[in-house]
Image (tube, helix red, strand yellow):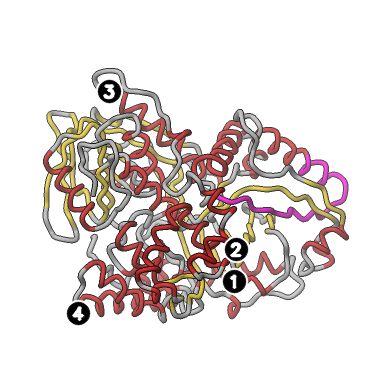
Amino acid sequence: MANSNTVSRSTKLGLEERSAAIEALKTKELDILVVGGGIVGAGSALDAVTRGLSTGILEARDWSSGTSSRSSKLVHGGIRYLEQLDFRLVREALIERGLLLQRIAPHLVKPVKFLYPLNRPIFERLYIGAGMLLYDLFSYTGGRPPGVPHHRHLTKRQVQKSIPSLRNNAFVGGLTYYDAQVDDARYVASLVRTASSYGAHAASRVRVEGFLKVGQRVVGVKAHDLETGERFEVRARQVVNATGVWTDDTQSMVGERGQFKVRASKGIHLLVPRDRFQSTMGLLLRTEKSVLFVIPWGRHWIIGTTDTDWNLDKAHPAATAADIDYLLEHVNKVLAVPLTRDDVEGVYAGLRPLLAGESDQTSKLSREHLVAHSVPGLVVIAGGKWTTYRVMAKDAIDAAADALDGKVPQSITENIALLGAEGYQAAWNKRGKIARAFGVHKVRIEHLLNRYGVLTDELLDLIRERPELNDALPGADDYIGAEVVYAASHEGALHLEDVLARRTRISIEAWDRGVSAAPVAARLMAGVLGWDEERTEREVATYLKRVAAERASQEQPDDESADRIRLEAPDIVAVR
């Protein structure tokens, strides 16, 4: 690892870097300490450290293990918010979409095309078309091109040609438009690594158990390293609470009532194989409550989402049989050959942190974000949506900076590319040459470039040293052994679940949800992290119990039953 006194720092986030970060957190007073390792927390850490502030970030579980890894995988303006006349939110999100696509993470964020099927030929085409025109216009207001094509009107025949699997009576025509998609968990892991490379002290599996106070002022936190059992204090001039759906729980540790409440809304998604229906684009469908997306995702389709209140375990929201049937019922309304439960290869559930209001329906609660100095020394950031994380982070650090002595520079994250982004297009253009040089199939190089950008070189170096790391993992042909090793050595993965559920998406993409890959991946991680045979077997056994519990919970009729079944599987590290 590079010397901490130099400008250039290590881009690794392995065991050595975690230990160094914890040592620094124990021994120095920080300007900013961020609590929460989801997209907003990671974004806040990067925002703070690139302003020149000494920064730390703690996460009780794995990076993005909550909401930030269980989204619809979309970077979008929120076209449905136009109907709610929330123009400011839509414009802000579309500007961020352009930044992510073209500047910040072109290797991770990609355009995706959607069809909106029309049921009425004239009024609906005019109404929806006007909304999509406004959507396109907003996307140009950020001072740069939007990075995606504009919307188009299609006739019924054009729709039939593009999506042969639609029922003939399900549409009279359609409109196409573009948004973008991202592997949300991979993005957060890259964001944390980027913050660390600029000097932030980042440590996952460290739980905050209380706040340090002098009088009424928060001056730090009481931390518990769940990997070693060590408890220690971290002192900081400003603490940022970016814990999403756990915001109210974190606030309660201060002994003060929060200025706003966060309500959890459960959304579930299904994965089905790409060959279950033919289409050259995704779908945007209306439901009686909200909208339903069918999103192309590699060899799969993602179908989602639901929007229901959730008051049970926040760490492991469970999908029910009723949730799955709801999604299948709605997508089958437009498909010529209906999908069945047997077509579902993966299911995941996540919680949206919505700002609680007077509405009883979570789909009506605010997607806006709020920042508050709830008590001196503590900034709370809550609400918002994945796409606008950078703006949320900027606002949170602005609030913290206002309370610091001296002039703090303005946010510069709109110009900070994530690790792997710089030079990505050039690497993509020579992907054929790279494949020939390493004797690797071109498709494999494309896969790696779209996950690691120019850092693909580091994985190819692993393969050069150990050619067997180019072998695909059992039951998960899209992923190779080098990715598992790299996740443990460079990307902060401390447990098998971290790799199978977040650094890769094997847990939702593989038919067996990673059961076959688990023993092979665990042995690869053991070589990096120094596990003995007993530890390796425990990692596998814990993961298999997780898969079994998730499958069983998805057969239950209601949230309470599904939650009870899901919680029968223990966490690899006790967090409660």
| Mark-to-mark CA distance, 2 and 3 | 44 Å
Badge 1 vs badge 3, beta-carbon distance below 8 Å:
no
Query: Residue at label 4?
Result: 534
| Mark-to-mark CA distance, 1 and 3 | 49 Å
Badge 2 vs badge 1, beta-carbon distance below 8 Å:
yes
Query: Residue at label 2?
Result: 303
Q: Which circle marks residue 272 in the picture?
A: 1
Closer to the eye: label 3 or 4: 4
Q: Is residue 543 above or below residue 63?
A: below
Query: Residue at label 3?
Result: 403
287 in the magenta segment: no
Q: Is residue 152 above or below residue 173?
A: above
Residue kind at label 4, given as amino acid type: Glu
For the residue carrying disc 3, how many other residues have a C-alpha within 10 Å: few (<14), some (14-19), or many (20+)? some
| Highlighted magenta segment, given as a residue range | 109-129
For the residue carrying disc 2, how many other residues have a C-alpha within 10 Å: few (<14), some (14-19), or many (20+)? many
The mark nearer the N terminus, 2 or 4, is 2
Query: 33 or 307, which lies in front?
Result: 33
The mark nearer the N terminus, 1 or 3, is 1
Q: Residue at x 67, y 40 (%)?
A: 83
Dot 4 falls on a residue whose secondary structure is helix
Q: Residue at x 32, y 57 (%)?
A: 490
| Mark-to-mark CA distance, 4 and 1 | 35 Å
Residue kind at label 3, given as amino acid type: Ala
Quarter where residue 57 is shown:
top left
